[in-house]
């Protein structure tokens, strides 16, 4: 009778070993899934930070075009186009901008502008919107698409008076 008990016990340890291997492999796969998700989240966060800086550079480019238009020769076309009577807040002037910085140049940067003047002869007030989006061909709705929008209102005489950011 002793030999019969040994045979039963050998089969039980094999089942236990297989069960433990399956559990450990499942935990390993779950940990790899969490690790991959964390790495993707970190990469998207870095892309978003660069897109934000690209949009800020677009606002600064537009502000320079407006505030320096009377100083630098020839006058900048962007500021004059913003003052056009045909331009309204619903149809602003839009200018694509290419940046030289290697970390910001892959983004599509569009700077839009329109200007208003309440009283004849008063300084113009410009509304600028900079939109930085997509990198490496990323399309809206894709898992790697980022977009940052910054809006600023600028008085040509005193500089930025209001800035709003959206993510």
Image (spheres, helix red, strand yellow):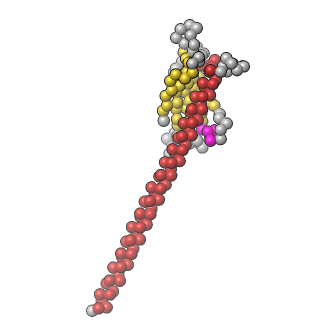
Q: Position of residue 86 (x, y in %)?
A: 58, 16
- Of the 4 image quadrants, the one containing the N terminus is bottom left
Give me the residue at 61% from left, 39% from top: 104
Q: Residue furthest left?
A: 1
Give me the residue at 57% from left, 36% from top: 53
Give me the residue at 47% from left, 59% from top: 32
Please give left or right for residue 132 compared with residue 9 in the image: right
Number of labels in the image equals: 0
Rendered position, 20 above or below 143: below
Q: Hey, which quadrant is residue 46 in on the image?
A: top right
Magenta residues span: 103-107
Secondary structure mostly taken by the magenta-highlighted segment of the chain: loop
- Is 104 magenta? The answer is yes
The residue nearer to you, when weighing 133 against 160, is 160
Please give left or right for residue 72 compared with residue 124 in the image: right
Rendered position, 12 above or below 139: below
Give me the residue at 60% from left, 28% from top: 60
Q: Hey, which quadrant is residue 27 in on the image?
A: bottom left
Is residue 139 something that shows in the picture?
Answer: no
The residue nearer to you, when weighing 111 against 155, is 155
């Amino acid at each position: 009778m002793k030999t019969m008990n040994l045979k039963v016990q050998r089969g039980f340890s094999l089942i236990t070993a297989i069960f433990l291997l399956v559990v450990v492999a499942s935990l390993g796969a779950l940990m790899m899934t969490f690790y991959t998700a964390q790495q993707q989240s970190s990469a998207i966060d870095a892309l978003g930070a660069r897109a934000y800086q690209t949009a800020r550079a677009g606002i600064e480019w537009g502000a320079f075009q407006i505030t320096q238009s009377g100083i630098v020769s020839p006058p900048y076309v962007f500021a004059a186009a913003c003052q056009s009577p045909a331009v309204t807040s619903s149809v602003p002037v839009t200018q694509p901008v290419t940046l030289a910085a290697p970390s910001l140049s892959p983004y599509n940067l569009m700077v839009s502008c329109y200007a208003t003047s309440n009283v004849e002869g008063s300084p113009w007030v410009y509304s600028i919107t900079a939109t930085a989006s997509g990198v490496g061909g990323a399309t809206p709705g894709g898992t790697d698409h980022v977009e940052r929008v910054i809006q600023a209102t600028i008085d040509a005489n005193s500089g930025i008076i209001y800035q709003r950011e959206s993510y």
